[in-house]
Image: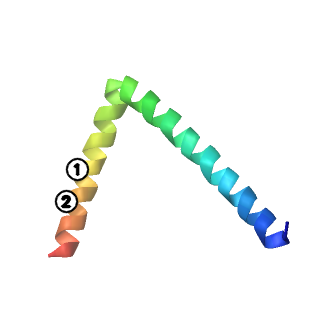
Amino acid sequence: MSKSSAVSDVDQQWKVEQDLRTLADAIEINKDPKRLAAVKALAKQKSAEMASIAK
């Protein structure tokens, strides 16, 4: 195994672990109505900001 392949494997493993943490966080957010409402409000705000830039 070359050094670049080993780095790639480590990077891939880190990405998979990060994805798992992301999915676990999403489950917890969906269980918490206040937290989910805050996320939705922020998403709506950011969407409006992006729409104003895209004009």
Residue lying at 38% horizontally and 24% vertically, measured from the top left: 32
Residue lying at 33% horizontally and 33% vertically, measured from the top left: 36
Q: Which picture quadrant has residue 34?
A: top left
Residue type pointed to by label 2? Ala
Q: Position of residue 37 (x, y in %)?
A: 28, 34
Q: Nearer the viewer, residue 26 or 10?
A: 10
Q: Position of residue 39 (x, y in %)?
A: 33, 41
Tell whether label 2 touches label 1 (CB within 8 Å): yes
Q: Split into 4 quadrants, where in the image is the N terminus?
A: bottom right
Mark 1 Cα-neighbour bin, 10 Å: few <14, some 14–19, many ≥20: few
Q: Split into 4 quadrants, where in the image is the C terminus?
A: bottom left
Q: Which residue is mark 2?
A: 48
Residue lying at 57% horizontally and 40% vertically, measured from the top left: 20
The number of callouts visible is 2
Q: Is residue 44 above or below residue 31?
A: below
Q: Which residue is mark 1?
A: 44
Q: Secondary structure at mark 1?
A: helix
Residue that sits furthest to the bottom in the current view: 55
Q: Is residue 28 above or below residue 5?
A: above
Q: Nearer the viewer, residue 2 or 12?
A: 2
- Is 25 situated left or right of 9 in this image? left
Q: Secondary structure at mark 2?
A: helix
Q: Which picture quadrant has residue 31?
A: top left
Mark 2 Cα-neighbour bin, 10 Å: few <14, some 14–19, many ≥20: few
Q: Position of residue 9 (x, y in %)?
A: 73, 59
Residue type pointed to by label 1? Lys
Q: How is the image coloured?
A: rainbow
